[in-house]
Image (tube, rainbow, N blue to C red):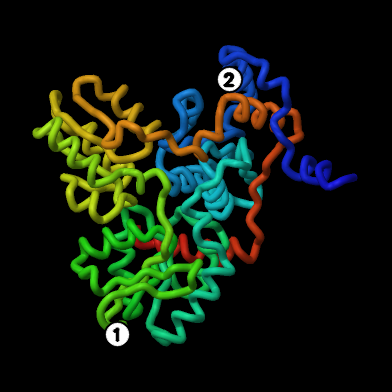
Amino acid sequence: MNLFETLEKKHPTLPARYHKMNADELEERINKVKRSMGRKLFLPGHHYQKDEVIQFADARGDSLKLAQLSASQHEAEAIVFCGVHFMAETADILSTEDQHVYLPDMRAGCSMADMANITQTEKAWQQLFDIFDDTILPLTYVNSTAAIKAFVGKNGGATVTSSNAAKMIQWAFSQKQRILFLPDQHLGRNTAYDLGIPLDQMAVWDPIMEELIHEGSIEDVKVILWKGHCSVHENFTVRNVQQVRADYPDMKIIVHPECSREVVELSDVAGSTNAIISAIDQAPAGSSWAVGTEMNLVNRIIHENPDQHIISLNPSMCPCLTMNRIDLQHLAWSLESLAAGEPTNLIKVDAGIAHDAKQALTRMLYRA
């Protein structure tokens, strides 16, 4: 067996026949498997998925909510996660041994999660320890790999979500003098700033240059931010905010805290994906909003709130490319392979990594 055959056996690619099927046929095939498997199948869909996929979701939400829901589906033997790789990993970590998690397309990753690998993190931890001694507690956004979650769990830290980051940072400061926040610098900076920590008490760790970037006295550093970001949310700019203010003076701007500090500061509201959805759902008819988050979700919010004027904060924004890897073809293939007893793209986290990662997740869930 040559290299390409080995790779194909490990991670098979979408069979050509699925490209020849139209949307109606693909949808019927998906529905047929869902009907036949019933509660033995659970299909969670992240908010950023395409409409063509999200229509089949048994539940939709953010990554952690979907992982928790997956673990609570005790009758479900198979969890086909319509999201990205780190979400499927978290579902596997929280599910039972009798449950199996699948990702329709293994190319569905997350650029932010990929900005912190375990080799970089372990090296950074040692260098930071040399600078600050044993005064740092690591926290990681759930948008991270299982290996990073395991590192954080093993070192006494916890995971955070965009909705509970403030609570978890406050907890971390009750444990240690400083925190290392992985892998999204913007969520860490925005949350810490809102908690009253000035910017000059924050530093950025650059994993490529292997250096700590800061101003002022190093002894005053309280928050060490990993130099990572969301490629979608970083594309919302100050110029976008200024343009909306000029074109729609009465429009409210609501953004995700993965946006830069400058954009968050100029906006009216910053909140998690669920907070954005709730704020607009609860707003009165006739309200107007510019929304700074992923485009599939913005379009869905527009569709579901026809009595409000809603636009994207960045009119040139594209959907999350990795989220868009999941499509009708891959979903149909994944479900039919599962029904045929030849499932593809099993997500299985190493037992040791899963154990340590679960500690980080449990510390958060206990306080959520």
From this view, report whether residue 341 is shown above or below residue 174: above
Q: Secondary structure at mark 1?
A: helix
Q: Amino acid at mark 1?
A: Glu
Residue at coordinates 41% horizontally, 36% vertically from top-left? Answer: 47
* Residue placed most toward the observer, 91 or 299: 299
The quadrant holding residue 326 is top right
* Residue placed most toward the observer, 334 or 107: 107
The image quadrant where one finds the C terminus is bottom left
How many discs appear?
2
Q: Amino acid at mark 2?
A: Asn
Residue 302 point in image, percent of width and height: 29, 25
Can the viewer see residue 102 in this picture? no
Label 2 crowd bin: few (<14), some (14–19), many (20+), radius 10 Å: some
Q: Are marks 2 and 1 in contact (CB under 8 Å)?
A: no
Residue at coordinates 19% horizontally, 24% vertically from top-left? Answer: 308
Residue at coordinates 64% horizontally, 44% vertically from top-left? Answer: 100
Q: Which mark is residue 219?
A: 1
Can the viewer see residue 99 in this picture? yes
Determine whether, in the image, residue 244 is placed left or right of residue 177. left
The quadrant holding residue 15 is top right
From this view, report whether residue 257 is shown above or below residue 306: below
Residue wearing tag 2: 31
Mark 2 / mark 1, whichever is N-terminal: 2
From this view, report whether residue 100 is shown above or below residue 116: above
Q: Which mark is residue 100?
A: none
Residue 144 point in image, percent of width and height: 49, 56
Q: Nearer the viewer, mark 2 or mark 1?
A: 1
Residue 92 point in image, percent of width and height: 58, 50
From this view, report whether residue 365 is shown above or below residue 108: below
Residue at coordinates 58% horizontally, 64% vertically from top-left? Answer: 355
